[in-house]
Image: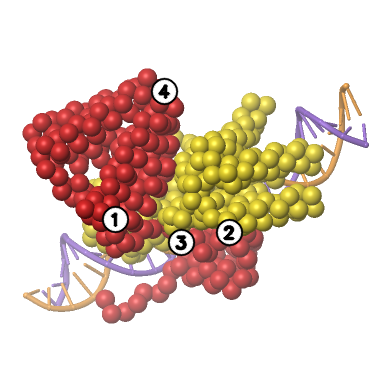
Chain colours: A red, B yellow, C purple, D orange
Amino acid sequence: MGLQRRETLTAQLTRTLQERIAAGDYPVGSKLPSEQDLIDEFGVSRTVVREAISSLRAGGVVATQQGVGAFVLNPGNTPFTIQAAELEVVYEVIAVLELRIGVETECAALAAQRRRDDHIVSLRGALDRMITAIGGGEDTVEPDLDFHRGIAEATGNRHFLNLFEYLGTLLIPRARLRAAYRPAEMDSYLNRINAQHEDIFQAIVRQDSDAARAAMRLHLTSSRERLRASIDGKHGG
Amino acid sequence: MGLQRRETLTAQLTRTLQERIAAGDYPVGSKLPSEQDLIDEFGVSRTVVREAISSLRAGGVVATQQGVGAFVLNPGNTPFTIQAAELEVVYEVIAVLELRIGVETECAALAAQRRRDDHIVSLRGALDRMITAIGGGEDTVEPDLDFHRGIAEATGNRHFLNLFEYLGTLLIPRARLRAAYRPAEMDSYLNRINAQHEDIFQAIVRQDSDAARAAMRLHLTSSRERLRASIDGKHGG
DNA sequence: TCACATCATCATGTCATACAAGCTGTCGAT
DNA sequence: ATCGACAGCTTGTATGACATGATGATGTGA
C-alpha cells in the first residue's frame, strides 16, 4: 500500500475549514457559512459539505443547531481526564473520591426519582451477589461496582453513567487498598458496607430522593474517612 | 426499530455503533457492516449512516476505504467526554446541567470548608463584575462563569476545577439560550441570579458548608427548571 | 403603543435516487 | 497456470425533495 490515494473531497473540505477556524477566519462563537454558501464557494455537493461539518462536529470543533447553523466552539475544549499515575498517592485517590461523592449522591437522588422496576431488580441482584460473595469469602469488588453502576443507570442520564464508568475504571486497580485487613475486621467492614448499600437501596425503592442522597453520602464519606484513617494510622502509630 | 427522536438520528446511530465497538460486537480490525446493511438494520437513510460513520472516522474510531469498507481501529484510552453535537437538543443540555448540579453543589460545600481569604476576594470580584455588567446591560456570561470557576478553585481539588472547565466550555455556546427574553424580564432574571450568587457567596464566606450546598442546588435547579419551562412553553402553547 | 398570534423564509435534518470510482473474485482466453 | 476483462460488491459524490426547527416581519386585537 505504498501509494497514497487522493484525498477525498470531504477530507479536503474538512481540513480547509479547520484551517480557517485555526486561523481565526471563523472566530470562536461565530457561525460558519450556511451549507448553501459552502456549496457555492467550493463547488461541491451538499453531501460533501454536510460530511465535512459532521466531521468537525465529531471532533468537537463546531456544534450545529437545526434551523440556525454551525457554531465554532472553544478549541481549548480538552476532555476531562485524570492521570492514572497520580492515583498512586492516597491523597489523590481521596480527591477522586470527593468527586465521586458529588456525582454519586446526585445519582442516588435522581435514581430514586426515576427508577423503573427493572432497575430495582438489577440493584437487588447486585446486592444479593455481594452478600453471596461476602459469605463465601470471595471478591466483592464486582458486585459492589455493579450496584453503584446500576444506580447510575437508573438516573436515565447517560453522562452520569459515563462519568461513573470513567472514575470507576480508574479506581478499580486501587481496590486492593481495602485488602489490608484481618479477616475478622474485614468481615465486619464488609457487613457495614452491605448495610449501607441496603439503606441506599431501600431509599431508592421507596423513591425517597433525599434519603437516597443522604445514605449515599454517608456511604462514600465513610469510605473516604477509612482512607484518611489508613494514612493517619501509618503516620501516627 | 428502537430509535427515538430526542437526538438527531445521526447522533443516535453514531452512539450505537460506538457502543457496539466498545462492547466488542465489532472487534478491532473487523469490518463494519456495509452502509446498505446499516440502512436495512436501522431503517434510516444513507445520509444518516454516512454521517455517523463520518463521525466515527473523525473520532479516530474507524477508517474507511473506498470500495472496501470501514474498519475498526485500535482504540486508545477513552476519557470522559460529552459529544458536543448532542447538545443541540435542549434535553441534552438539561442532562449535562444535572451533572453540573451534582458536581457544583459538592464544590460549594467543599469550598465553604476550605476557602482561603484570597478565594473570597476573587469571588467577590466576580460578583462585582457581574453587577456592573447587569447595570450596563452587558454580557454577564463571563463574570458568571468566573464566579462558578472560583468556587471550584476554592475546593482545592483540581478534579472539580477540571471537570467544571470541561462542562463549562461545552455549555458556553448555548449561553445564548438564555438570551430569548425581553429586557424587563431579562433584568429581573439577572437580578435573581445575582441574589442567588450572593447567597452562595455568603455561605462560603461564613464557612457554612450545608448552606452553601443548599444555595448552589437552589441556584442550578432553578436554571434547570427555566430550561424545562422554555420547552414546555413551546410545546404547550 | 404594546403584546401576541401568524406566517414567510431560511437554516439544518432526513430521505431517495443516481452515478462515479475503487476493490475483489470469477471466468474465460491464451 | 497466467493474465485480462468483467460483474458485483464497496464507498464517494451529486442532486432534488421534503421535514423540522428558528427567526424576523407582519398584521391583529387589546
Numbered disc in front, either 4 or 1: 1
In the picture provided, is B16 more to the left or to the right than A137?
right
- The residue nearer to you, when weighing B85 against A93, is A93
Q: Amino acid at mark 2?
A: Asp
Tags 3 and 1 both on a single chain: yes
Q: What subunit carries mark 4?
A: A
Q: Quadrant of the N terminus of chain A?
A: bottom left
Disc 4/disc 3 C-alpha distance (Å): 37 Å
Tags 2 and 1 both on a single chain: no
Numbered disc in front, either 3 or 1: 1
Asked if residue A193 is positioned above or below residue A208 in the image, the reply reads: below
Residue that mark 1 sits on: A90
Residue A218 visible in rendering? yes
Q: What subunit carries mark 1?
A: A
Residue A78 - label: 3
Secondary element at tag 1 = helix
- The residue nearer to you, when weighing A194 against A125, is A194
Tell me which label, 4 or 3, sits earlier in the chain.
3
Instruction: Tell me where residue B57 sits by quadrant.
Output: bottom left
- The location of residue A169, given as percent across then percent down, is 27, 50
Tags 2 and 4 both on a single chain: no
Disc 4/disc 1 C-alpha distance (Å): 34 Å
- The location of residue B235, given as percent across then percent down, is 62, 29
Numbered disc in front, either 2 or 3: 2
In the picture provided, is A10 more to the left or to the right than A181?
right
- Residue at the spot x=35%, y=77% of the render? A4
Residue that mark 4 sits on: A208
The crowding category of the residue bearing disc 2, from other C-alpha atoms within 10 Å (few below 14, some 14 to 19, many at least 20), is few
In the picture provided, is A124 more to the left or to the right than A156?
left
Residue B118 - label: 2
- The location of residue A223, given as percent across then percent down, is 29, 42
